[in-house]
Amino acid sequence: MPWLPEAARGRLIATVVIGMLASACSSPGPSPSPSEAPLAIPEPGRPFDAATILEAMRASRRPGGVPDQLQTDAIAAELAQRIWTIDGEPWTTMSVGGSCGPVRCTLDVAGSRSGSPGEDLYAFEIIPAAGEVAPLSADLRSLPPDVAAILDRLAREAEAAIGRDGLALASARWLPPPDHETFELSYRSGNEEGFCELELSLNVESGAVERRSANGC
């Protein structure tokens, strides 16, 4: 710009610099790559009320159904407070069955959702006379496919053996609150000869493998 007076050249340079800064501020940043996209593990919730649980007990098609002494509003309300789903959404299907001895009863509640290969299974011990409901076990495998994919991705980032040994996710289960950040994953090789099994306990909050065991790997 030798043909411009010095003052004009200064004003032009300042204008160009300001324009460049404005452009940089208004231009969108680069889109995150798939590996940088936020992970969405849902928050668990209790989707059932006492009326829904009571209706499921009354409609049971299990052999023997549900004993009459368990079909009360109070017991149904206690059960509703102890049944969680991984995303707080109700199951597509639910089945309930139970049996009673002289004092104690047991009750199983199972549920699954469309698109999920697994089911959630809760087992309870109940003392009807005292109105006591205590959980015995929870085997929770009803996971939406997108959640299973996220878990697989996190596990592969934390455990190199999955990719190295060509393992595939065979099953996954989650733990109810207060341990809902922990998932139990099972990996298997597709080769019947030299069959490899890998079991992982994965914390999705930290992304760390807290426990692992391998067989045939």
Image (spheres, grey):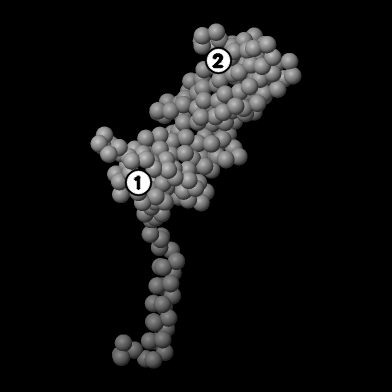
> Which image quarter: residue 193?
top left
Residue beneath the point at 59% across and 37% down: 177
The relative height of residue 9 versus residue 107 in the rendered view (above or below) is below
User: Residue furthest toward the right?
Assistant: 130
Q: SS for tag 1?
A: helix
What is the number of callouts on the image? 2
Residue beneath the point at 50% across and 27% down: 120
| Secondary structure type for disc 2 | strand
Residue 71 horizontal/vertical position (percent):
65, 13
Q: Is residue 75 above or below residue 206?
A: above
Quarter of the figure with residue 199: top left
User: Which residue, given by chain and number where applicable, does mark 1 sit on?
Assistant: 162
Tell me if residue 149 can be seen.
no
Nearest the viewer among 3 and 100 is 100
Residue toward you, 172 or 42: 172
The foreground one among 149 and 186 is 186
Name the residue: 46% across, 31% down: 141
Q: Amino acid at mark 1?
A: Ile
Density class for disc 2 (Cα within 10 Å; few <14, some 14-19, many ≥20) is: many
Q: Which residue is mark 2?
A: 97
> Horizontal and vertical percent for residue 43?
55, 39
Amino acid of disc 2: Gly
Q: Nearer the viewer, mark 2 or mark 1?
A: 1
| Left or right: 9 in relation to 120 | left
